[in-house]
Image: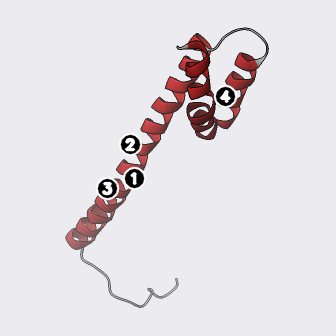
Amino acid sequence: MSPPLPGPTLPGNERKIMMFMFGLLELFLLLPLLGLGLLAFGFWLWMLIDCVTKESSTGNDKLVWVLLLLFTHLLGALLYCFIRRPRRKAELGA
């Protein structure tokens, strides 16, 4: 049997309190990240639906943008939002 490790040990209740506090800290750090992830997913989905429903079907533009959105997720949604969407609105008015 190996000897116990050196260092302070906490009684049962104090140890439970410390573990609970570490769990709350992690929760408060992860909740904002979860919220940002949900916002990013919602934005990506909005741009994907916008592209599928409002992009003209002539040529390969629609297919290329849909594939770009599917494979690059948030980066593709940002590119579509700031590059293609304003140009489409100027051309088609939609």
In this view, the residue farthest toward the bottom is: 6
According to the picture, the residue beneath numbered tag 3 turns out to be 28
Ranked by sequence position, the earlier of labels 1 and 2 is: 1
Of the numbered discs 4 and 3, the one sitting upstream in the chain is 3
Compared to residue 35, the image places residue 71 above or below, namely above
Residue at 24% over, 76% down? 11
Residue type at tag 3 = Phe
The residue to which callout 4 is attached is 70
In the image, 25: left or right of 79? left
Residue that mark 1 sits on: 30
Nearest to N terminus: mark 2 or mark 4 = 2
Label 1 close to label 3 by CB (< 8 Å): yes
- Residue 44: image quadrant is top right
Residue 30 at what x, y percent from top left? 39, 52
Label for residue 44? none
Q: Residue at x 74, y 19 (%)?
A: 61
Helix, strand or loop under label 3: helix
Residue count near mark 4 (Cα–Cα under 10 Å), binned few <14, some 14–19, many ≥20: some
Residue 35 is labelled as: 2
Q: Nearer the viewer, mark 3 or mark 2?
A: 2
Q: Amino acid at mark 2?
A: Gly
Q: In whole angstroms, how far apart are the C-alphas of marks 1 and 3?
A: 6 Å
Secondary structure, mark 4, is helix
Q: CA distance from mark 4 to mark 3?
A: 31 Å
Q: Residue 36: percent from the left, percent from the top? A: 42, 44
